[in-house]
């Protein structure tokens, strides 16, 4: 009997008679990704060529049942590495029926901040950690009813018993490259069955866009393997590392000669708004930011050179060269990237009228 994969491949290779499959994806009311597919008969050259669409927001915690239509407005297009051909992935923002951004559409306000500070040429790089689980809710590959050996040999590990799920990780890596995502690397993490991939450097709003599409692809690839992806910042209790989304930040001024002064100035501004940043740096992040397992405490701000136990780290190479970037180690693995990049820009480059990133979460 043929495998499901070979049967699926047979159908995926069928001709589409000029039609294009457009997979619209969006962030729902629980910070998860949803998608639905639409057939097009003309190849779009930009998001403006794509039709607005809608969905039932009462089923995604984005609208009440008596006024449930939420509209999808395309903002970015990527080649679909799973369907191939001219098929595409369409990243969309969510809007209410009255034309206002949905309460969980954090991209809209983030884009305003990025546009206002475009002259700063800000770049981001996000290190997305995640954990893989089997269908029984156990970390994938762990001994049935037991635990692997303590942490130590797994980080950047090679070899049986040291790494798990490399097939899924490699498939996701290739899918991101084929989709045009600026994925810059992968590595096994400290806890077995936990991995990390890095996206960036990406300018401005592109950071949130590319991370969102990369997450969609991760879920889709894992779906084909029968594995579940968790972005929870503390997926397992006990003496195991949590999962973060370390966010690297650099402006034109920071990259110039003597840029270390701009880096230190930015870190000083971050210290003054520590509580506001923590508020938008991921749900259940307090379970991860304990001051243990390579984290600082959620309640205090700290920074240092090459210190992974600080809130913000200045890499050793940056301190030596006197320019470059800094790494904010506080964001959790389940962040909304638009909230995180938005509040960082707001804090280090300045606020703009009618936008307050931290208050957006309270309103939602």
Image: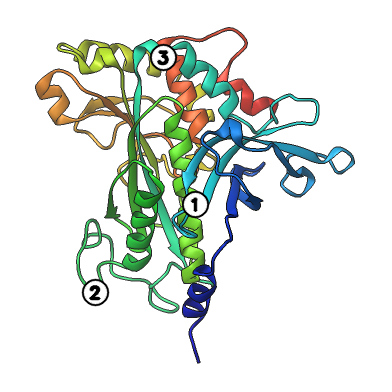
- Foreground of the two, 229 or 97: 97
Residue density around tag 1, few if under 14, some if 14–19, many if 20 or more, within 10 Å: some
Left or right: 257 in relation to 35: left
- Residue at x-position 39% and y-position 55%: 175
Q: Which quarter of the figure has residue 289?
A: top left
Task: Mark 3 vs mark 2: give the one in front.
Answer: 3
- Foreground of the two, 168 or 151: 168
Task: Mark 2 vs mark 1: give the one in front.
Answer: 1
> Is 60 above or below relative to 219?
above
Q: CA distance from mark 3 to mark 2?
A: 47 Å
Q: CA distance from mark 3 to mark 1?
A: 32 Å
Q: Are marks 3 and 1 in contact (CB under 8 Å)?
A: no
Query: Which numbered disc covers residue 3?
Result: none
- Residue at x-position 60% and y-position 44%: 42
Point out residue 228 in the picture as x, y percentages from the top left corner: 50, 63
> Is 25 above or below relative to 160?
above
- Foreground of the two, 198 or 268: 198
- List the single residue furthest toward the left: 320
Left or right: 77 in relation to 257: right
Q: Which residue is mark 1?
A: 86
Left or right: 53 in relation to 222: right
Q: Quadrant of the C terminus?
A: top right
Residue density around tag 3, few if under 14, some if 14–19, many if 20 or more, within 10 Å: few
Residue density around tag 2, few if under 14, some if 14–19, many if 20 or more, within 10 Å: few
Q: Secondary structure at mark 1?
A: loop
């Amino acid at each position: 009997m043929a495998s499901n994969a070979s049967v699926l491949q047979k159908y995926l290779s069928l001709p589409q008679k000029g039609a294009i499959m457009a997979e619209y994806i969006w962030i729902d009311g629980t910070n998860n990704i949803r998608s639905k597919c639409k057939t097009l008969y003309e190849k779009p050259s930009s998001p403006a060529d794509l039709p607005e669409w809608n969905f039932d927001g009462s089923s995604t915690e984005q609208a009440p049942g008596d006024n449930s239509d939420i509209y999808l407005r395309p903002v970015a297009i990527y080649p679909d590495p799973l369907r191939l051909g001219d098929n595409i992935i369409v990243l969309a923002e969510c809007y209410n029926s009255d034309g206002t951004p949905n309460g969980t559409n954090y991209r809209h306000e983030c884009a305003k901040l990025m546009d206002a500070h475009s002259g700063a040429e800000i770049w981001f790089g996000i290190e997305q950690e995640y954990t893989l689980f089997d269908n029984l809710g156990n970390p994938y590959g762990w001994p049935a009813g037991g635990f692997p050996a303590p942490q130590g040999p797994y980080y950047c590990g090679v070899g049986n018993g040291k790494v798990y799920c490399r097939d899924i990780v490699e498939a996701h890596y290739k899918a991101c490259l084929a989709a045009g995502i600026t994925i810059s690397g992968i590595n096994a993490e400290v806890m077995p069955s936990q991995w990390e991939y890095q996206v960036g450097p990406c300018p401005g709003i592109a950071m949130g866009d590319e991370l969102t599409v990369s997450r969609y692809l991760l879920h889709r690839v894992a779906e084909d393997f029968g594995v579940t992806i968790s972005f929870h910042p503390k997926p397992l209790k006990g003496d195991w590392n949590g999962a973060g989304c370390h966010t690297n930040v650099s402006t034109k001024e920071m990259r110039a000669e003597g840029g270390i002064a701009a880096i230190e100035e930015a870190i000083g501004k971050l210290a003054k708004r520590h509580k506001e940043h923590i508020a938008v740096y991921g749900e259940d992040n307090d379970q991860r930011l304990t001051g243990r397992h390579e984290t600082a405490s959620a309640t205090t701000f700290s920074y240092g050179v090459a210190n992974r136990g600080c809130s913000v780290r200045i890499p050793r190479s940056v301190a030596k060269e006197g320019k470059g970037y800094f790494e904010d180690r506080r964001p959790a693995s389940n962040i909304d990237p638009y909230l995180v990049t938005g509040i960082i820009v707001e804090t280090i480059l300045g606020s703009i009228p009618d936008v307050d990133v931290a208050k957006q979460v309270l309103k939602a």
